[in-house]
Amino acid sequence: MILPNIQDFIQSNITNRKESFFKKDLENNKKKLHKEINGKSVLVIGGAGTIGSSFIKAALLYNPSELVVVDTNENGLTELTRTLRSNINIKIPNVYLTYPMSFNSIIFYKMFKSHGKFDIVANFAAHKHVRSEKDQFSIEAMIKNNVIDAKKFLDFLKSFKPEHFFCVSTDKAANPVNVMGGSKKLMEHVIMSYSNKLKITTARFANVAFSNGSLLYGFLERLLQRQPISCPSDVKRFFVSPEESGEICLLTCILGKSGDIYFPKLDANQLVSFKKITIDFFKYLKRDIKLFDSEDEAKKASLSISDISPYPVYFFKSDTSGEKLYEEFYSNEDVVELDKYESIGIITNSAKPTNSEIDSIINEIKLIFNNEIYIKSDIIKALNKLIPDFQHIEKGKNLDERM
């Protein structure tokens, strides 16, 4: 089967825009971006993923002198390098290094100290999927990565202050209903507590269409493996393209004031349902679909998939823990500025927990993790102490129990 032109499909059927949502703000701030990035050293953690690699591509347009990329995904780093070196429009600096390692490792800190200091540091190393909270052990790994290790890194950076530090967040941090969103909300609180020590910013943004590991990216894998498509019928999301995800992170990193949270000014009319995307995807492929009432029926039908047969699709109502039917970028308690940019809103850091409050909750979470026996609800109760609007949706079923 010939796979679709994904960029064209995103523009014509998901975001419904041929130009970047952030084009005007990129143009209006071109001089500032060039001044702050040209000739500077850049460290990108988690740079092999969709958002991190898109940030790299956006930053390279402004000619940094050094680019160091860290990621635990060795294969991803290899493919990133192939992508960058195969693109005629990208200029890679003479100093370009990739390190397959974790940013919480002794080796990482050894590498960082040997370099001395980076001008720009961006951290995309995070657990980003709701499915990564299926049990207490997955949650421990998530919170360790998203919060505890991130805070340790911030403590380290106080001695190696970059000019700009960025740490990625998510729209799921607004009125969180899953532990991933709750962990990112806690991470935002941590950032606020360091905003007077480091120039530090973060961004909440929408689903990145066809990003690695996403439901839509899975469509491509299912087609290659001739497996059925499974999709929620009642879930809507905001979307940005991979290119746009890198651009808003770069704009936030360079232009934001310390403690700012940036988000795209998308309105409710731009929410798109996964069901609609699925139907449009097969129309784009000029391929009929056949709907089934269960996973088992769709899987049985996949045994006879041919290049011309209708493709088996199963739509279901969302019934798993931690899933909202739609997402938001900010809550009623947030102080929001909407007039500074054409395409970006800002949540200012008018209200933030004290350092002692944050240390207290993190220490409590660590104590829970130090126990041999604890359950998911113990962690949720601890998070609720600092994030009272965290209303976890528990349905007793996780995403790994679905196709």
Image (cartoon, rainbow, N blue to C red):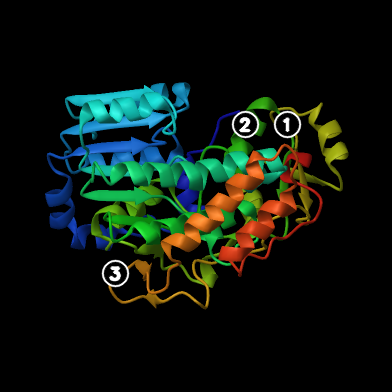
Can residue 205 be seen in this snapshot? no
Q: Is residue 148 left or right of residue 166?
A: right
Which label sits in the foreground, 2 or 3? 3
- Pick the quarter of the image with the N terminus: top right
Q: Is residue 63 left or right of residue 210?
A: left
Q: Which residue is mark 1?
A: 227
The amino acid beneath tag 3 is Tyr
Q: Secondary structure at mark 2?
A: helix
The amino acid beneath tag 2 is Glu
The amino acid beneath tag 1 is Gln
Earlier-in-chain disc, 1 versus 2? 2
Residue ID at (46%, 27%): 72
- Count residues near mark 1 (Cα–Cα under 10 Å), then give few for <14, some for 14-19, many for 20+: many
Earlier-in-chain disc, 2 versus 3? 2
- Estimate the x, y position of residue 32 in percent, counting from the top left: 15, 56
- Count residues near mark 2 (Cα–Cα under 10 Å), then give few for <14, some for 14-19, many for 20+: few
- Estimate the x, y position of residue 323 in percent, counting from the top left: 68, 57
Q: CA distance from mark 1 to mark 2?
A: 8 Å
Q: Which residue is mark 3?
A: 341
Q: Secondary structure at mark 3?
A: loop
Q: Which residue is mark 2?
A: 221
- Pick the quarter of the image with the C terminus: top right
Earlier-in-chain disc, 1 versus 3? 1
Q: CA distance from mark 1 to mark 3?
A: 44 Å
Dot 1 and dot 2 residues touching (CB under 8 Å)? yes
